[in-house]
Image (cartoon, rainbow, N blue to C red):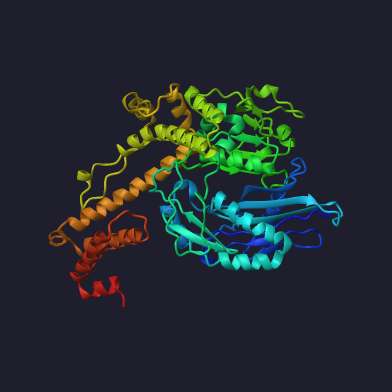
Amino acid sequence: AETRLPALPAGAFSGRSASTPVAAQGWDEAEPPLVYPSDFRLTDKEKSSICYLSFPDSHSGCLGDTQFSFRIRQCSGQRSPWHAEDRHYNSGAPMSLQREPAHYFGYVYFRQVKDSSVQRGYFQKSLVLVSRLPFVRLFQALLSLIAPEYFSKPAPCLEAVCSEIDEWPAPVPGQTLNLPVMGVVLQVHIPSRVDKPEYSPPKPCSHENLLPAPVILTSVHELDLFRCFQPVLTHVQTLWELMLLGEPLVVLAPSPAMSSELVLALISCLQPLKFCCDYRPYFTIHDSEFKEFTTRTQAPPNVVLGVTNPFFIKTLQHWPHILRVGEPKMAGDLPKQVKLKKPSRLKTLDTKPGLYTAYSAHLHRDKALLKRLLKGLQKKKPWDTQTALLRRHLLELTQSFIIPLEHYMASLMPLQKNITAWKTPPQIRPFRQDDFLRSLEHAGPQLTCVLKGDWLGLYRRFFKSPHFDGWYRQRHKEMAQKLEALHLEAICEANIETWMKDKSEVEVVDLVLKLREKLVQAQGRQLPVKEATLQRAQLYIETVIGSLPKDLQAVLCPP
């Protein structure tokens, strides 16, 4: 076949140390893929996956230009090194926007147009950008600038673009950056975990001295939720529950653009909770994990799969939840909604749009939300207003669910008065599910959410999900670090000279080693302590070492 497979490429901005953008030219049997920069290492398996995923399959029939995204697992032993920049970025970024250590995101710009000079009668080519950052809006905007130029002048264009992107500053959470490329300046705000949830675009920073005037992106990652959820608005709450519980879900859509956007929209439903399961915005039968995901010898994995090939209906009919959507259609004032259907009605050849599941939602549907969205449609309100309404609803729903867990978890932390300088800090008490469920009677989600339903049943299922495990591990880790920080502060506030009076040399040396270990942890940003505390700890170490015999000082402070 002469079909031109696509561009590989990849980057994550920026700086060679962080993971550099790469781009690649289309190829056929006689033309190998071209990757920029040439020193970016991808395995043959990764290249093959990227090539297959960079084309809509034959069932999509995409004509013209289309954009979509995918996500692949990095090959074993090929994971990106954990750079210091990664740790610095991840420590300030929201959980859902941290760099992926074991996966690549692929952002695709595909063009298919009639061309009589080509044997098959069509020009088919893709440009792909590969990154470990989930900045779908930024990278789609970037490809919209690069791809049209690339399709007419492949190699020179990519060399110039990669050179420009390589000069971009590293992304720092909380900063607004100006990113020049191809005569345009993209202005973006890098989200921070301390940002308050925004329902309106952030105000642009001053750009009086910038020529040309920057193109301001209101978000690096947020999708148009209302457009993505058009066919499933009546089932948004059920889908939110399925995401919360980490349930296996197949999304069958007419095109990679629809499948990838709907999967990413579903994943974003849980923000600010981190999505801890696997997900593939676009997945094909050529994917290296095809056998792993389709086997019937074990339960379906906790994965959300976006597909376009109806073959998956047959291959994955043992999965508990399958969502099939068609091309967006209007039914009066409201987009045509898919219906809830039993899995037994799933037909392998001609499956109609619908959410095929035996799952019964724990919470009652929010009819007021649907009325407001319908009213907005009738009044022809802007879609970004509708999206803001939908995003606020999902955010408040997730927060109402998580706040009682956060409050209970905080109650497991030892009291500060019990943390003393010269004793091992007390341990965080264990999370007891029954105690938590009992606490819901007076401190449950009903305090912040009007929705009725079986909240207890939802929490019980949540406890068995990967998301509870991921949330609990992260919170426990943060609390343990806070405990270490409080202990370090207690030591620094104590009178160390009084303590040393009746201590043996072994005990004093042990204190030096422990203080040094805490200092290393704190300086590596793993402990939330003030700079003044670090300076005092260093002074204490010097004081303690100075009280020891010269031979021990030489051991502890070698020249």
Rendering coords of residue 363 (x, y %): 48, 24
Rendering coords of residue 131 (x, y %): 58, 56
Q: Name the residue nearer the viewer: 459 or 444.
A: 444
Residue shown at the point (60%, 23%) measured from the top left: 358
Q: Is residue 438 above or below residue 288?
A: above
Residue shown at the point (70%, 51%) measured from the top left: 110
Rendering coords of residue 28 (x, y %): 79, 58
Looking at the rendered image, the quarter that the C terminus falls into is bottom left
Q: Is residue 460 above or below residue 39?
A: above
Q: Is residue 457 above or below residue 494?
A: above
**Can residue 38 be seen here?**
no
In the image: residue 115, left or right of residue 422: right
Residue shown at the point (19%, 68%) measured from the top left: 543
| Image quadrant where residue 255 sits | top right
In the image: residue 220, left or right of residue 38: left
**Can residue 69 be seen here?**
yes
Q: Name the residue nearer the viewer: 148 or 305.
A: 148
Residue found farthest to the bottom: 559
In the image: residue 220, left or right of residue 338: left
Q: Name the residue nearer the viewer: 212 or 318.
A: 212
Rendering coords of residue 218 (x, y %): 49, 49
Residue shown at the point (57%, 57%) measured from the top left: 79
Number of numbered discs on residues: 0
